[in-house]
Amino acid sequence: MKKIFPFFILFFVLASIITTLCTMGGVDSSVFNPLKTLSKFFIVMAMMAIGFNTDIVKLVKSGGKPIFMGLCCWISISLVSLGMQMALGLH
């Protein structure tokens, strides 16, 4: 289970619960602004590491299936993100 479960999801849920409980308990949400900035930085760094580790020639040679899968993932994540923003009135 440890090898196949992405633990960052567990940590994300845990951080969300802690933040929600703290703000419900009276802690000002601006306290978490530095952590939000830091988390954006880490996400950008992770995406860069994935991009630098990608062998474009090997990806193109392996065929269109991986590229199509990535496109489908990108489209679905974008649509879910935009849908949630609209549902929450954040657009």
Image (spheres, grey):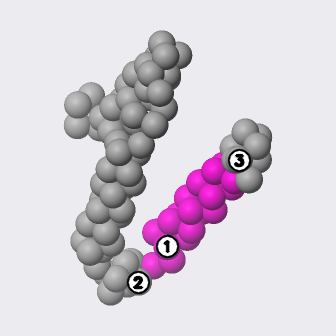
Instruction: Using the image, determine if residue 73 lies above or below residue 36.
Output: below
Between discs 1 and 3, the one toward the N terminus:
1
Between discs 2 and 1, the one toward the N terminus:
2
Indicate the secondary structure of the residue bearing disc 2.
Answer: helix
| Residue at far top of view | 25
Majority SS type along the magenta span: helix
- Return the x and y of residue 48 as percentages of the image width and height: 31, 69
**Taking 84 as reference, is 43 left or right?**
left
The residue labelled by disc 1 is 67
- Return the x and y of residue 55 as percentages of the image width and height: 28, 79
**Taking 29 as reference, is 49 left or right?**
left
Between discs 3 and 2, the one toward the N terminus:
2
Image marks 2 and 1: residues in contact by CB distance under 8 Å:
yes
The residue labelled by disc 3 is 90
Query: Which segment is the magenta one?
Result: 63-83
- Return the x and y of residue 88 as percentages of the image width and height: 73, 39
Please state which amino acid type lies under the numbered disc 1.
Ile
- How far apart marks 1 and 3 lie (CA) works out to 31 Å
- Return the x and y of residue 35 as percentages of the image width and height: 35, 42
Question: Is any atom of residue 13 visible in this view?
Answer: no
Image quadrant occupied by the N terminus:
top left
Instruction: Using the image, determine if residue 2 lies above or below residue 75.
Output: above
The residue labelled by disc 2 is 60
Please state which amino acid type lies under the numbered disc 3.
Leu
Of residue 31 and residue 22, the one placed in the foreground of this image is: 31
Q: Determine which quarter of the picture holds residue 51.
A: bottom left
